[in-house]
Image (cartoon, rainbow, N blue to C red):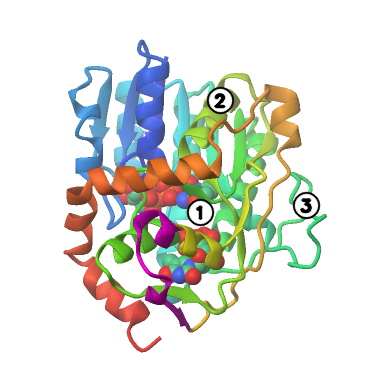
Amino acid sequence: MKVLVTGGAGFIGSNFVYYMLKKHPDYDILCVDCLTYAGNMSTLEEALKNPHFKFFKVNICDRVSIYKIFEEEHPDIVVNFAAESHVDRSIENPEVFLTTNILGTQVMMDACRKYGIKRYHQVSTDEVYGDLPLDRPDLFFTETTPIHTSSPYSSSKAGADLLVLAYHRTYGLPVSVSRCSNNYGPYHFPEKLIPLMIANALNDKPLPVYGEGLNVRDWLYVEDHCKAIDLIIHKGRVGEVYNIGGHNEMRNIDIVKLICKELGKPESLIKHVGDRKGHDMRYAIDPTKIHNELGWLPETKFADGIKKTIKWYLENRKWWEDIISGDYQNYYAKMYNNR
Ligand code: NAD
Ligand code: TYD
């Protein structure tokens, strides 16, 4: 079996590459990634030593190069992780989100149609459902919750989801879609909440919490997400959407305090800063469908996952220090100075 993974030099894609190489040692794993600011070759250092792994530095919007890969490699399964993924960046500059997340998805699916495929899987997000109110803890996102997006990021992901499902209905492309809650774990780019707070705390820098920090996210350890996708591409029904989440809701402020505690840093580092525009209040997934149909359940509890994640950032300082010493500094100054 040959699995083509796009966005495999990023956070979840790289974790998926490692998961698949370990779980299916006889599979060939191809990675397509154009290495934006979020993609990192050092993340794939170990994978590159494996003869079952191959890397292509290609943009998913580049139709000619994508078709060439399909013509030469004939993948059986495509898992599309490649995307612009950060809400704050989408608020600053929406255009590249629409280009990569929607048009790039189209190119990948056109290649699948042209060359034939057993399964095209689209990695989507719970953010396509918009948000839930804080005073209704009884409400959860199900697969039938209407799409109701808030940010240019979530709108671009929703556009891609609709296109994927349309390619199934119109052309019979064997697709599936998964919508996962917030992930955390190794190789998470330090612009996102958890790795940013770990890196700043370790450097005794202020911890910028947007607004009051009461927003709730439903956190899932990245390996549990990878396991769910592996199940869906092998056993999930074609044309279906599967929600992935572990009933693990946390307020941002509580996460930041927990990180301070784990690292032995004072909470006085916490600095409340201007809120995100259009900030979603609460995400919460109902994972009943994937549990009932595929037997998936998350395995890592947040209390253990956050410890493992912090340990990884302590043991892999070079990985994130290299990132935050480069262009990231301009990004950080633009987003956080005078906020
Ligand atoms: P990431 O930003 O860490 O990685 C994205 C990767 O895609 C990078 O390696 C980047 O170089 C690559 N990429 C971007 N544009 C590309 C293009 N045009 N062509 C080829 N490669 C390109 O993102 P992530 O957090 O790993 O998210 C992966 C996927 O999972 C995304 O589709 C995202 O929407 C989805 N998702 C993420 C989360 C989360 O909590 N991070 C939750 C649910 C769903
Ligand atoms: P983030 O990791 O960007 O994921 P998403 O917006 O896709 O859920 O942010 C998680 C939450 O943390 C979100 O409510 C915004 C908040 N946040 C901060 O308070 N400070 C920060 O510096 C960042 C990056 C995020």
Asked which quadrant contains residue 208, the reply is bottom left
**Where does the C terminus fall, quadrant-wise?**
bottom left
The one of 4 and 48 positioned closer to us in this rendering: 48
For disc 1, the marked residue is 102
**Residue at the image position 28 percent from the left and 55 percent from the top:** 36
- Where is residue 126 drawn, in percent x and y? 63, 52
- Give neighbour class at mark 3: few <14, some 14-19, many 20+ (Cα, 10 Å): few
For disc 3, the marked residue is 145
Observer-side mark, 2 or 1, equals 2
Q: CA distance from mark 3 to mark 2?
A: 23 Å
On screen, residue 119 above or below 315? above
Q: Secondary structure at mark 2?
A: helix
On screen, residue 126 above or below 65? below
Determine whether the beta carbon of the residue marked 1 sits less than 8 angstroms from the nearest atom of ligand 1.
no
Asked which quadrant contains residue 241, the reply is top right
- Where is residue 149 drawn, in percent x and y? 65, 64
| Numbered tag placed on residue 194 in the rendering | none
Q: Name which residue type carries label 3.
A: Thr
Q: Which residues lie in the magenta part? A: 259-273
